[in-house]
Image: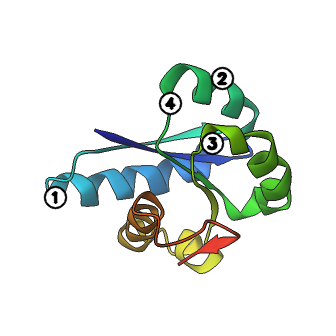
Amino acid sequence: MKRIYLFCSAGMSTSMLASNMQEVADKHKLPFEVQAFPDGKIGEIIAERHPDVILLGPQIKFRYNDISSQYADTGIPIAVINAADYGMMNGEKVLKAAVKLLKGKDKGDGDVR
């Protein structure tokens, strides 16, 4: 099972998106675990749960460079969720973007679409 973890300032609004993404994954019988957490727990979550992809909420986009630099040695792809997809709570599009990151088709440098 691949772990796709979303992070934002408090983990609240991102929880709704994670839930939508999980519904899409379940509907298509995809082996994904999608969860949301507050950004202050990134280090702890990486150490304990070993995510396969990390997506940052648009509200913490300003932290992308610091976070990706700090955890570069983990090899985990890190990207920022596209603001329009986030605002529309488009779980399917964000899940597709996460799958692209998993497959290495997107470098994760900034917004994922």
Q: Position of residue 96 (x, y in %)?
A: 38, 70
The Cα atoms of the two marked residues, 3 and 1, are separated by: 24 Å
User: Is 24 left, or right, of 70 in this rendering?
Assistant: left
| Residue at (63% x, 46% y) in the render | 7
Q: Nearer the viewer, residue 15 or 5?
A: 5
Mark seen at residue 41: none
Query: In the image, residue 76 lies at what x, y percent?
Result: 57, 46
Q: Is residue 82 positioned above or below 63 on the image?
A: below
Which callout, 3 or 1, points at the residue further toward the start of the chain? 3
Q: Position of residue 78 (x, y in %)?
A: 62, 54
Asked whether the beta carbons under mark 4 and mark 2 sit within 8 Å of each other, the answer is no
Q: Which residue is mark 1?
A: 27
Residue drawn at (66%, 23%) of the image: 44
Residue type at numbered disc 1: Lys
Work out how far the residue at label 3 is from the one at label 2, CA to CA, in angstroms.
15 Å
Residue 86 lies in quadrant: bottom right
Dot 4 corresponds to which residue?
50
SS at mark 3 in the image: loop
Earlier in the chain: of badge 3 and badge 2, it is 3
Tell me the distance, in whole angstroms, between the alpha carbons under discs 4 and 3. 18 Å
Which three-letter amino acid code belongs to the residue tagged 2?
Answer: Glu
Earlier-in-chain disc, 4 versus 2: 2
